[in-house]
Image (cartoon, rainbow, N blue to C red):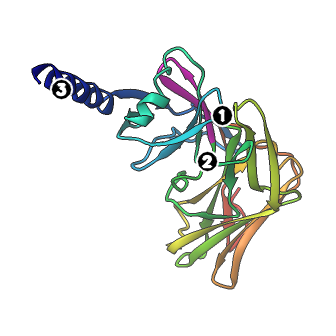
Amino acid sequence: MLGLCALVALAFTACKKNDTQKVSFTATMPQTVNDVRTHANDLGTELFWDEGNTITVLNAAGQDMDFTLVSFDEQVATFTAEGDAATFMQEIETADYVAFYPAVVEGEGVKMTIPAEQTYEAGVWFANDLYPMVGFNEGNNFVFQSNCGFLNVSFKDLLGGREADRVVLTANENIAGDMVYAKNGMSYVFEGTSNTITITCATKQPLYSDLARDFTFVLPEGVLANGFTVEIYDGETLLGGATTQVSNPIVAQQFLIMPVVFLGGNQPE
């Protein structure tokens, strides 16, 4: 009887140890740069993690599992895997994994979407869970990179006192759609669905004559090489805009910052 009790106790201890197995790993944001098509500026364009961000991790066999960060310090996020998740991540130090954000695994690919409807964020920022990234592990750290970049446009209203609720970007090719990656993260196909992207404001944003109002679009690399148009609206009223035929191709991990568009009059000399 004592021997049987000891055996049961040993089995219980082993299960408990397995249940509490834990693997921690991190993920690092890609570095970005500015390509300023106007005067020098001091816009900060570093990328940071946000609370609740979830990455999708795939192992070498193509199996996938989602992980939500448990903590973050600006550009570095920390994740914890326990139980079955710890078993899934147990070879993180020695084997190849790949991570996607924000992603949906479909069939033999991983889909990340650049939506035709994007949400306004103040300054040079863009909405959470919007910027597609893929990360490869170096030990227990995923180093993320992206095949997407940014277009920053800004407006000053010489009339003053007006407001805007959306900005529409129109190009000569599709600029919104799905980026469908191979499960190993080494290649992708852009499946375009729209040649326009609209940034909508949750509340109307005031426009000023002495302070620019910024809007930042997330876009796939390579688009806008054939020119584009931006228009700013207040309801059904077109407040103004600008068109360029100059090639301004979007570069991955780069902010393309265009000259200020002046509304209600000509651009000052």
Residue bearing mark 1: 62
- Point out residue 70 in the picture as x, y percentages from the top left corner: 35, 40
Q: Residue furthest left?
A: 2
Q: Is residue 102 magenta?
A: no
Q: Is residue 8 above or below residue 260?
A: above
Alpha carbon of mark 2 to alpha carbon of mark 1: how far? 14 Å
State the count of labels.
Answer: 3
Which of label 2 and label 3 is nearer to you? 3
Dot 2 or dot 3, earlier in sequence: 3
Q: Residue furthest top?
A: 94
Q: Residue at x 45, y 28 (%)?
A: 87
Q: Residue furthest bottom?
A: 236
Q: Residue furthest front?
A: 1
Q: Secondary structure at mark 1?
A: loop
| Three-letter code for the amino acid on which mark 1 is drawn | Gly
Which range is magenta? 133-145
On screen, residue 39 versus residue 192, left or right, reads: left
Q: Is residue 135 magenta?
A: yes
Residue bearing mark 2: 103
